[in-house]
Amino acid sequence: MKKFFILRGNSSRSGVLNGLVSILSSLPEDVDYQVVVEPYKENKTVEQRNSFHLLCKIFGDDTGYTQGEIKSMVVSKVFGTTNVMGVEVGPSTEKLKMDDYSRLIEGAYILAAEAGVVLPILRR
């Protein structure tokens, strides 16, 4: 069982502590547990995902590349690549968070501009 709590400033801390105490008191004592506290990052939005894919399609249509090829190029440029069995691949975008998707969108604009392609400014 996984349970997540999001601390937003001081206002939610007492509720999180009460919830944590409640969960801990109901767990079997003969099992070890891990409690992790880390900075929270918002998930990407559907709007961000759709915007990035639209920009990749427009960029690809203008340059003769497919939307997927442009997407791979932008992801690789923004986040780098890893060698997997002799092939350089960028990270999957499925688990990216909101700030990472913002970086992808910005990267698409930068690479398009470097290629002489003017992408439309999307409303956010």
Image (cartoon, rainbow, N blue to C red):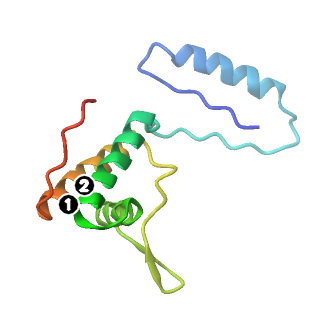
Image quadrant occupied by the C terminus: top left
At numbered mark 2, what does the secondary structure look like: helix, strand or loop? helix
> What's the residue at 23%, 49% (across, down)?
106
> What's the residue at 45%, 35% (across, down)?
46
Answer left or right for 88 relative to 32. left
Mark 2 touching mark 1, by CB under 8 A?
A: yes
Answer left or right for 31 relative to 6. right
Q: Which mark is residue 107?
A: 2
What percent of the width, then of the height, locates residue 115?
A: 15, 65
Answer left or right for 100 relative to 46. left
Q: Which mark is residue 34?
A: none
At numbered mark 1, what does the secondary structure look like: helix, strand or loop? helix
Q: CA distance from mark 2 to mark 1?
A: 6 Å
What residue sits right under mark 1 in the picture? 111
Depth check: give the residue in front, 122 or 15: 122
The answer to whether residue 45 of the structure is visible from this angle is no
Packing grade of label 2 (10 A; few <14, some 14-19, many >=20) is many
Query: Residue 70 falls in which quadrant of the image?
Result: bottom left
Say which amino acid is labelled 2: Gly
Residue 69 drawn above or below residue 36? below
Say which amino acid is labelled 1: Leu
Image quadrant occupied by the N terminus: top right
Residue 52 drawn above or below residue 10? below
